[in-house]
Image: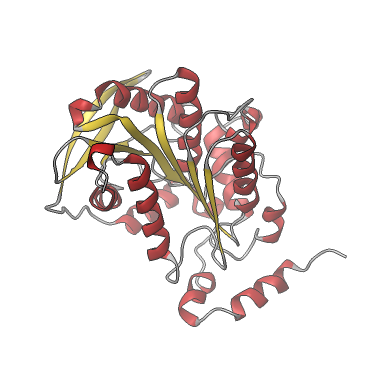
Amino acid sequence: MPRDYDQLRKERLAKLDPVRRAPYENMRPPLRELGVEGMRARGKAIMGAPAPDPDVTYRDIEIKGPNGPVPTRIFTPKGSSPKGIYIHVHAGGYIMFGGLDTMTNSNIRIAKETGCVVVAPDFRLPPEHPFPAAVEDCWATVSWVGGHAKEIGGDPGHIGIGGGCTGGNIAAVMALMARDARAPKLAAQYLSATVFDCRCDYASFEENGNGYNLSADDDRYVIEVYLKYMENRWDWRASPILAPSVKDVAPAYIYVGEWDVLRDESKAYANRLRDAGVPVTLVVQPEESHAPGPGSAAAVSAAMTAFLRDHLTPKARAK
């Protein structure tokens, strides 16, 4: 007999206190209804204006890309060099968070807490620039960092990459491309609530498909906009779980919520990494959906910081 997932949701939410339950009771409109411009407006409102921090400086550069320059912001925390480098591929359902200012507060926090130089490319977004434009721009950035690490105060032996959701998707692809190119050698990849498979064919899409903060149709919609042609779902640069091999990619930390539609593909990718002998930490956060809620956000952020510090702190500076 088919499971009643609406009833399951009611049972789950009934166990939460009012603060943790609130995000699931005040749902935003579906992303397909918001559309591209609605998503972008919402994203700007969420992020707010940049708030500078005296402990982190930043500057803007342009990196030569395959179809013109890639605007990039480099965040440098106080302290002596060399530092680890974290390339942050921003989230946003592929569509949102364009512009150098949008993720500035998040990148300041990452730089300050991890002690890493943070490199944030403003890669091209769909629908104006569909797949593989973002992949091409991010690869140009990764390649540039590999050749200019010392110039930006970083250690070329301690370069990591990461992102959330669609940013995690592109970051996982970058880790595979860096492995194939044999440069730069990445030391870590942090993949949070990540799209690993654009085919969207996992049990968690049924179980968690409605009534949480990312629906199954939300995920399908942003993938449709990103790929333009759905046969691109089978390209491993869109669905990194389809890569012929994941052997020798950077050690990974994979975070996903128990109630996220992306839960099962995250578990499947972690298993692929383990089978290939890649060190991987998989965290399935209980009673959370696509984003950490008020009950777990601080712990999730602290775990990310610890992982990046552990893998990206140059040994001469390690405590």
239 on left or right of 58: right
Residue at the farthest right position? 1
Residue 214, position as x, y percentages in the image: 55, 57
Q: Locate residue 286 relative to residue 308 in the image: left or right.
A: right
Q: Is residue 129 visible?
A: no
| Front residue of 317 and 114 | 317
Residue 303 falls in which quadrant of the image? Answer: bottom left
Please report the residue visible at 58 percent of the width from the left and 64 percent of the height from the top.
212
What x and y, as percent, mark residue 110? 29, 50
Query: Closest to the observer: 233 or 80?
Result: 80
Residue 265 visible here? yes
Name the foreground residue: 300 vs 235. Answer: 300
Q: Quadrant of the N terminus?
A: bottom right
The answer to whether residue 278 is left or right of residue 120 is: right
Q: Residue furthest left?
A: 54
Residue 78 appears at what percent x and percent y? 14, 46
Scheme of colours in the image: secondary structure
Residue occupying the point 67% across, 53% down:
205
Tell how many labels.
Answer: 0
Residue 11 position (above or below residue 155): below
Closer to the camera in the image, 223 or 158: 158
Give the image location of residue 288, x and y in percent. Answer: 54, 65
Is the residue 15 above or below the residue 212 in the image?
below
Task: Say which quarter of the image contains residue 145.
Answer: top left
